[in-house]
Image (cartoon, rainbow, N blue to C red):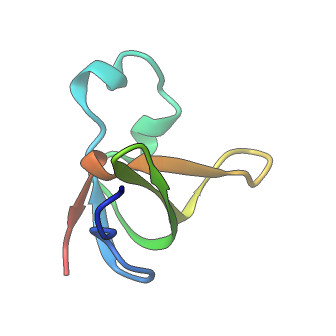
Amino acid sequence: MVAKSKFKYGQLVEVHVPVLEQTKTDMLLKYNCRLYRVSGYKPFNCSYMYTLAGCHGKDRMPFWFAQEWLEAVE
């Protein structure tokens, strides 16, 4: 069973890409330490994955961020 989502739709969060992940892809680094609003979420294992408004690939497919990569701002 997955616990209740930590973040809600529209909540302001800051992205913190873990150091080990930073060396794997430059694509996500442009979002690191920036503020975004949660635009969606879904359960994943024992946690949640989140989409953030404005964080997407070239084909407009949204990036999914692990809950552990996000910090609440408000």
Q: In which image quadrant can residue 9 be found? A: bottom left
Q: Position of residue 22 (x, y in %)?
A: 34, 25
Residue at image point 20% right, 69% down? 72
Viewer-nearest residue: 21 or 67: 67
Quarter of the figure with residue 2 = bottom left
Tell me: residue 24, above or below residue 59.
above
Say whether residue 31 is left or right of residue 55.
left
Q: Quadrant of the C terminus?
A: bottom left
Q: Position of residue 60 (x, y in %)?
A: 75, 55
Comparing 15 with 65, the one in front is 65
Residue at 46% x, 38% y is 28
Near-viewer residue (35 or 47): 47
Q: Quadrant of the N terminus?
A: bottom left
x and y percent of residue 12 in the render? 32, 76
Side (left or right) of 15 relative to 39: left
Q: Is residue 10 above or below residue 2?
A: below
How many numbered markers are drawn? Answer: 0
With respect to residue 56, does 40 lie above or below?
below
Residue located 47% across and 26% down the image = 26
Left or right placement of residue 72 versus residue 26 in this view: left
